[in-house]
Structures are given as structure tokens and as C-alpha cells.
Image (tube, grey):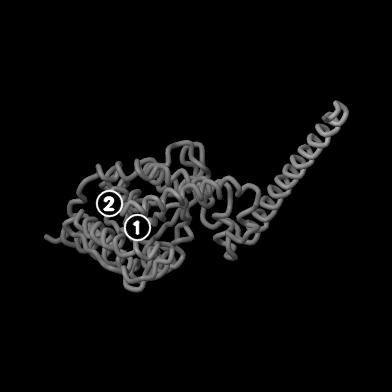
Amino acid sequence: MPTPVKEKASGQVFRRALLGLITVAVLCGVAGICYQSIASSRDRHSFPLPGQLFDVGGYKIHIVCTGSGAPAVILDSGLGDSYISWRKVQPQIAQFTRVCSYDRAGLGYSDSSPHPRTSKEIAQELRTLLQRAGVSPPYILCGHSMGGFDVRLYTSLYRSEVAGIVLIDSAHPEQIKRFPPAINDLDASDLRQQEFLAAITPFGIPRLLGFCGKDVEIRTAECNFKNAWEIVFEEKALSESAAQTAATGSLGDLPLVVLSHDPNSPQPDLPEDLVKPLNDVWAQMQDELARLSMRGTHVVAKNSGHYIQLDRPDLVIEAVREIGRQVAGASDNRKAP
């Protein structure tokens, strides 16, 4: 039977070991925070802020505008993506009109927003940003993936400011309901992984493990605590954003081009047995998006995955040009005697 003296000594050893483990954990955490901060500062020094920041109501949003002309083209990225997702498209569009890409609140260089991260709120923030940045309507709105919700909400709220829309492999309001159940299970798993990633980002772990990649521009804008949590917030608001978008209804005769990915393009992130069922549903939904307007067209982007603006930037540029031609033609018709 242990004596009281031995029990006391054993307890002291346990407490010391526990205290030692806590101390090591705290020191590692502090070291990780310092590493993340120093590395982030070094990246910002290597790649200074492009564009400008504008106050939209107590917080600032980042926008990059290039080129000149009208109508201006506004580029809205997919869920969790910064302005960088348009870097193969923006320089080419800037050769024939003004074009702006931006970071939604919380993403990239933009401050976090105190407001819900729904598409309606995002559309309202975008309008304030464009006003503050001096970008005058009308606009050709380009929305990739979840950004498709945002531009449709913008059009619903401020119809007179929109000259046309390009939807780039855009989300559909009914996709959660119509996807195979296994896809929604994968999405739920991805959300949990993103929450974990966001929790460890302040300690520099994703950066240390190489998750942030070698591209300094992307790493500077996106490898930070704020950006990681914004992805979580946008994903959690996706159902509400879908419901808001579903309520917007028809686009009438607004010029519209829908670009969708090539169903024969490899999709390594999906189990093989889910690829065809998902593509079949996706193609049907993209056709439905094109029918939102009497002037809508649907183009399948051959040899392209979900990021058409990166795989086939030529198609996005041509879609913008086509809408520009339609807008110019309509204007000439109104001027004709």
C-alpha cells in the first residue's frame, strides 16, 4: 500500500510534468505566432498592396482597377478566392475597357465585415465599394462559382446599373438539393477541414507544412487567419445566399453568357463514381441559368475545369466582348432615328 509520502511525491511529479507540457505548448504557440507574423510581413514587403483600399462603412475593401472605357467590367470571385483568380483575364480585358477585380470583405487584403456573409450583403458592399472607388455604371458583371450568386443579387437590387452578366461555372440556387447526397457529405467534410485549418493558421502551421504554396502573390493575399475564417463564414452562409438568389427571378432581356466546365475534364478531387452524376446535374443547371434571360447563351468550355478563367481565359474575355457588342448595338438602335 502506497504511503502518504509516496502519494505526495507522485502527485508532484505529475503536476510538474503537466506544467512542463503546458509550458512547451505555450512556447510552441508563441513561436508559431511569431513565425507567421514575420513570414507574412516578409511576403508583404516582397509583394506590396496592388490597387487601393476604400472604406465601405467602418471597414475597408480592396479593389484593383485597370484600363479605361465603358461599360466597366466587375469581376467577382468564387468562394474563398481573392482578386488573384482573375490575373489571366484582367490584363486582357483592360486592353479594351475598364475592369476591376476585388477582394470580398475578409478575403485577401480586405478587412473583415461585421455583417453576415450572404450574397445580398456582399452585393450591397460591392455597390458601396464601386461608388467610393469612382467606378461608374453601367457594369458587365462576371461571377465565378459562388460569385454567380453575388452578381445576380446585385442585378436584382440595382438593375439599372447592370449592362450584362457573365456566369462562369456559376453556382445554382438548387444545387444542394439536386446534388447526389454523397457530394453534400463531401462538402460538410470540407467545411470541418476548413474550420480546423482556420484554427491553426495563426500559429503558422499551414505555412510551415507548405499548404500556402510558393506563389508569393497568392501567399501574401490568402495565407492568413482572416482569409481562412472568411472561407468558413461564406460557406456557412451558402444556403442563405442560394435562397436569396432563387428569389431574384428572371433577368428579362439582359445580355447573359453562361460558361460551364468541360464534363470530360479530369476532376481528381471527386470519387470516380460521382463524376458523371454530378456533371449531368451541373450541365442541366447551367442550361437553366442560360434561360434566365431571353438573350442568354450557354457555352461549354472545352478542356477546362471549374476555374475557366484560369484554364480558358480566352472564353471569358470573348464573353465580355460579346456582351459589350450587344450593349453597343442596343445603344446604336436607341440613337437611330
- Residue 101 drawn above or below residue 115: below
Pointer 1: what residue? 142
Report x, y in % for residue 59. 51, 40
Left or right: where 82 falls relative to 332: right
- Rounded to the nearest angstrom, the CA distance separating label 2 from label 1 is 24 Å
Pointer 2: what residue? 178
Q: Earlier in the sequence, mark 2 or mark 1?
A: 1
Q: Nearer the viewer, residue 75 or 16?
A: 16
- Residue 59 drawn above or below residue 41: above
Q: Residues within 10 Å of mark 2 (few under 14, many from 20)?
A: some
Left or right: where 319 falls relative to 194: left
Classify mark 1: helix, strand or loop: strand
- Residue 121 drawn above or below residue 288: above
| Residue visible at 65% across and 48% down in the picture | 203
Report x, y in % for residue 80. 46, 52
- Residue 293, quarter of picture: bottom left
Left or right: where 24 falls relative to 104: right
Q: Residue furthest left?
A: 337
Disc nearest the viewer among 2 and 1:
2
Q: Amino acid at mark 1?
A: Cys
Classify mark 2: helix, strand or loop: helix
- Residue 110 drawn above or below residue 95: above
Left or right: where 24 falls relative to 248: right
Q: Amino acid at mark 2?
A: Arg
Q: Nearer the viewer, residue 51 or 269?
A: 269
Q: Quadrant of the N terminus?
A: top right
Q: Residues within 10 Å of mark 1 (few under 14, many from 20)?
A: many
Report x, y in % for residue 72. 35, 57
Report x, y in % for residue 144. 37, 57
Q: Is residue 161 visible?
A: no
| Residue visible at 31% across and 68% down in the picture | 263
